[in-house]
Amino acid sequence: MDLPMNAIVQQPKSTVVKLFPLNGNFPNNPKLPLVIYDQALKLPPDGAPDEIEKLIQSNGWGNSWRWGLYDYHHYHSTAHECLCIYRGTVTVQFGGEKGFKVVAEAGDVVILPAGLCHRNIQCSPRFRTVGCYPAGQTPDMKYGKPGERPAADRAIAAVPLPKLDPVYGKIGSLLKHWKTLT
């Protein structure tokens, strides 16, 4: 892959692609998988959150924020989400109470399709991420409460695919993974 011209972008060590079925009150996303780029970002000790935000904005992702990750199950029915880990480590559970657990660290990029339940199980004291969403998408907050579905399912199905990969733009594998399953 010819990498975009950005000092913090590097070839990922690996890419995890995992699809999640419906799980009770959590719709997850039975069509679009979670995509994780292992060490896609080459970061200095401060994590370079300003550079990360410039990168994702150049690829049509925005509405960014800097912080941690909620420690309770939640999902967004109106937006896809990208987490660019820039400091520390976090163990994230995806898919619901008995879901898939991933340890993400500085340099990893985690891209969640709309509807995928997630929560922070444990993190290092200095853990921080830049979160963002595709242009034109604004997240809601859903908690897997009775009554959220089927309206949440309809909202998830209506969320458009992003035009570009948040890190690799036109050459990223995100759109390939998401288009092959839609």
Image: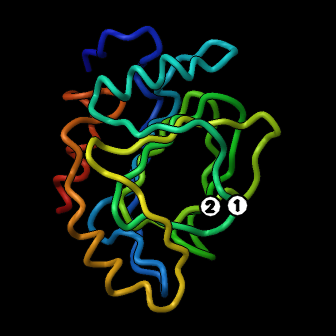
Q: Quadrant of residue 156?
A: bottom left
Q: Residue at x 63, y 20 (%)?
A: 47
Q: Along the line of sight, which residue is nearer the eye, 138 or 70?
A: 138
> Amino acid under label 1?
Asp
Residue located farthest toward the right when viewing the structure as drawn: 125
Q: Earlier in the sequence, mark 1 or mark 2?
A: 1
Determine which residue is flagged by label 1. Answer: 71
Would you say the residues marked 1 and 2 are in contact, meaning their CB atoms lie under 8 Å apart?
A: yes
Q: Position of residue 157 (x, y in %)?
A: 23, 70
Determine which residue is flagged by label 2. Answer: 119
Position of 14 relative to 176 (above/below):
above
> Amino acid under label 2?
Arg
Left/right of residue 98 with respect to residue 60 in the rendered view = right
Left/right of residue 105 with respect to residue 174 in the rendered view = right
| Viewport quadrant of the C terminus | bottom left
Left/right of residue 116 with respect to residue 181 in the rendered view = right
Q: Position of residue 131 (x, y in %)?
A: 50, 41
Element under disc 1: loop
Left/right of residue 87 with respect to residue 147 in the rendered view = right
The CA distance from mark 1 to mark 2 is 5 Å
Q: Position of residue 116 (x, y in %)?
A: 44, 65
Q: Residue at x 37, y 67 (%)?
A: 77
Q: Along the line of sight, which residue is nearer the eye, 140 or 156?
A: 140
